Image: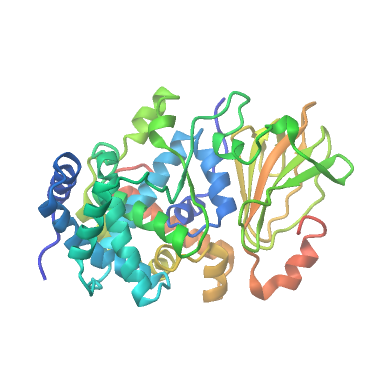
Amino acid sequence: MEDSPSHDELIEWFSAVALRQDRRAFESLFNHFAPKIKRYLLRQGAPEHHAEELAQETMVQIWRKAHQYDPAKAVPGAWVYRVARNLRIDRLRRQRFYEVDLDQVAEQADEAQDHDRATDQIDGEQIRARVAALPPEQREIVNLAYFEGLSQSEIGARLGLPLGTVKSRLRLAFGKLRKALGEEV
Amino acid sequence: MSIRHHPDDATLVAYGAGSVNEGFSLLLAAHLERCPRCRRRVTETEVLGGELLETLEDSPLSGGGFDAVWARVCTEEQSPAPAAAPSQTTTPPTTDGLPSVLAAHLPGGLEDVRWRTLAPGIKQHVLRDVDSGNGSIRLLAIAPGTTIPQHGHGGSELTLVLKGSFMDQIGRFQAGDVADVDVGIHHQPVADTSETCICLIATDERLRFSDSLSRMLQPFFGI
């Protein structure tokens, strides 16, 4: 099993795909992300062949949208995650997912400029360490929300917990991550 | 106009996780259009999503793997098709202050809504073209001084003020503010100025095990 590519490597691959339609860089992105995206779709309840097909389609979209990727605005993993999440909601749940176009709203207010320019100094290692260190009961709920697409009410029903408990655990887990991002919680 | 009341962090995480229903995502996107603070937080929930993706074990692709994807990419290069957008991206807010994400559902703006009277001083309009599962999404117009009867919730409920303002036990909510209310919380909003208060209200799925209970608690808001 090879090591995970570094943040800088990922950005290099994205740039090569966006600027030069570089096949080798795209293959590197594929090798790293496609198997994880497929696992993500399986966890979301897609049957094997469908997960395979949608993982491929996610990669096609990544190729197609690579020119929109701006390293100053998003970390590579978060950007890939958004593409996979949106396709998953569209195809598996057959619902629309409404998002805001950050490029367009950023022009409206000066303060927004700072706020939207999120994440160029993210320390992936530290976030990963924080995620790994989450208490099991918080981690479980984070996983149910992200990987099984369960709403808070559904998580409560699944685990037999009051909605308030589900919310406070999600809030606590997110607060720990925000500290790793250098935010004041 | 500054926004004072934001969705709970847990709600923003659920949005970033893609585990909210279509109605919630519409309401939250309408809030995000105007709220840099929450946009930043949503970006953080997506960073978390990216890191969680990294923690997953690989499920190797069978079949042609990369070759299949490369073949598709090459075919598309030759006959470039307009990219189909799986998500609904919004344009800037319209001039009458209606969030653009919502304007698409209300072609005539707030002036042209087909209201249905629910109770004296309270009118509603359900957005039927939004798939909210067992929940719902609707506009509510509350006449000045009118109080919404005390009610509980069978799940989560989000309220976004579009016009005017209301007061409840938590505080005063004005345009752009979101009230994020839990199950079991009883609140009693009152439109507190001389202007009609127009809100967008979304509910999520009701808890299956407490369906009869939630029906009892929702005397006339449930659909």
Q: Position of residue A155 (x, y in %)?
A: 52, 69
Examine the image and state in which quarter residue B161 appears: top right
Front-most of residues B84 and B133: B84
Q: How is the image coloured?
A: rainbow
Residue B121 placement: quadrant: top right
- A34 or A176, nearer to the observer: A34
Q: Which quarter shows the C terminus of chain A?
A: top left
Using the image, determine if residue B10 lies above or below residue B134: above
**Residue A41 appears at what percent x and percent y?**
36, 68
Pick the front one: B117 or A177: B117
Q: Position of residue B52 (x, y in %)?
A: 31, 61
Left or right, residue B158 beside residue A151: right
Q: Using residue A29 as the reference point, say whether residue A74 is left or right of it.
A: right
Judging depth in this view, the residue of A66 and B5 nearest the camera is A66
For the point 11% across and 63% down, the residue is: A3
Q: Residue shown at 32%/59% (left/top)?
A: A57
- Total tally of numbered discs in the picture: 0
Residue B7 visible to an observer of this rendering: no
Relative to A160, is B177 above or below?
above
Residue at point 68%, 56% (across, down): B185
The correct choice, above or below, for A71 with respect to B206 in the image is above
